[in-house]
DNA sequence: CCTTTTACTTGACATGGTGTCAATTGACAT
DNA sequence: ATGTCAATTGACACCATGTCAAGTAAAAGG
């Protein structure tokens, strides 16, 4: 048992590693963060990281879950799930996911960078995107139910379009490269989704 | 089956390296292609590659230019440049660029994978995307001239939207992950661009 | 109080890809 | 014959990941 396990103080090592990973990835965007850097930031030896995570990919995957948990993505998605109309569901979904992107983005980028060289990282990220796709599919179904989905798209195509529109990469281009604010990103993305998917 | 014309001899080593790079990147998508693999495919020693390209990044950058040249992107863009109406210009631009993407995609992917670790690769890719953005800006200007650009977008925003819509990554998601055909990609992308940018 | 377990440390080392260097070869031109 | 050029070979440094063995300090538990 840990002496200071109560309400605060020093988090356990595993958590400190995850926090260090987040911090480093946030602070040094698009620079390769090494295992040694993470260890140093967590205040342990490089080798000790491997006592908690068997390899870099697993650490990054665990970090995505850690971020999900600390930012409570599930709760954030609630307004979309309980929306009355299809359009509301769509808009709330975009707001929820769009607000989540900046938070997972640093880790997501690191994970995506491993995609080509690491099968586990590839699959982990695929699964996440697949899960997100289900949110898109649900929003599209709500539009279908309300009979407001544009007739030129099949359900699958509409889902594909929304899924692509909401990709992390698009967020990256618009906010990082084009300099859009987060608010602008959300507002414009909602407008684009409506225009592309909802018949007027 | 005949790779080289009878009259001309075997292409020079530099060209063979570039061809080998293309072939390998096309054939083994999303797998790390090593310098040694390229050398072997070009029929030379690994070290000899460095007699022609100082490092991996430079080789990949040269390969993008090589692909541009062999597929004649400039000519392909002509119909857009000479289009009468803004909408035509937009549509021809999407067709040209959208048809070009599958050709540069293998190299583009390899280059983008180096973005985070190699400054030169990052800049080279940025420049390419910046050049593409000018095509987007020109198409948007043509819409403005014809007074058909949707009033809710500024010129810059419209350019940002088109530029993002036409990103290599979006092509990748739609054709690789969602299984769209190339024709479907082009048709739908044109439709989306019109709906988002052109007032009806 | 002594023993065991747990978490971590240190140092050493294998692996794999990139990039460099020196010495050498073989063809071709002058 | 000689010099140049392209390429070869083998060796090696670098760097990040991941592994292994031996050691330590402190808490757990009898």
Image (cartoon, coloured by chain):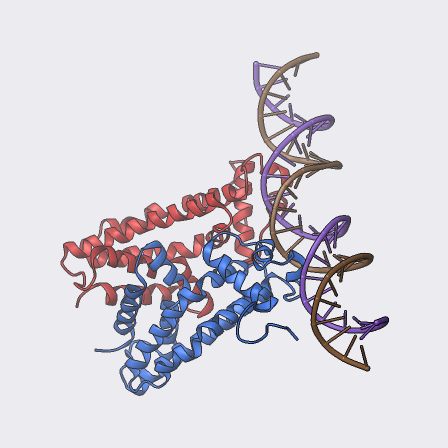
Chain colours: A blue, B red, C purple, D brown
Residue A128 locus on image (x, y percent): 49, 72
Residue B19 locus on image (x, y percent): 53, 45
Where does the C terminus of chain B fall, quadrant-wise?
bottom left
- Which residue is at a point 64% across and 56% down the rendered structure image? A46
Q: Quadrant of residue A186?
A: bottom left
Residue B111 locus on image (x, y percent): 48, 50
Judge whether residue A188 can be spotted in this image: yes
Count of numbered marks: 0
Judge whether residue B166 can be spotted in this image: no
- Which residue is at a point 48% across and 63% down the rendered structure image? A108
> In front here: C9 or B43?
C9
- Which residue is at a point 27% across and 68% down the rendered structure image? A187
Q: Quadrant of residue B165?
A: bottom left
Residue B33 drawn above or below residue C28: below
Q: Is residue B27 left or right of residue C12?
A: left
Residue B89 drawn above or below residue A16: above
Q: Quadrant of residue A170?
A: bottom left
Residue A44 drawn above or below residue C20: below
Residue B125 locus on image (x, y percent): 42, 48
> In front here: B67 or A116?
A116
């Amino acid at each position: 048992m840990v002496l200071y396990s109560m309400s605060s103080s020093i988090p356990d090592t595993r958590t400190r590693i995850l926090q260090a990973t987040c911090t480093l990835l946030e602070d040094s965007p698009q620079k390769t963060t090494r295992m040694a850097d993470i260890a140093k930031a967590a205040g342990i030896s490089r080798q000790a990281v491997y006592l908690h995570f068997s390899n870099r990919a697993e650490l990054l995957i665990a970090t995505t879950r850690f971020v999900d948990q600390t930012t409570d993505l599930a709760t954030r998605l609630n307004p979309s799930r309980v929306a009355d109309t299809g359009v509301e569901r769509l808009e709330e979904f975009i707001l929820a996911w769009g607000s989540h992107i900046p938070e997972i983005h640093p880790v997501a980028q690191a994970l995506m960078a491993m995609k080509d060289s690491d099968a586990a990282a590839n699959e982990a990220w695929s699964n996440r995107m697949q899960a997100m796709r289900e949110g898109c599919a649900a929003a599209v179904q709500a539009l279908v139910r309300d009979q407001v989905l544009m007739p030129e798209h099949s359900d699958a195509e509409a889902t594909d379009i929304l899924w692509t529109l909401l990709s992390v990469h698009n967020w990256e281009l618009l906010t990082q490269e084009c300099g859009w604010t987060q608010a602008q990103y959300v507002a414009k993305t909602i407008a684009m989704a409506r225009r592309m998917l909802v018949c007027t």
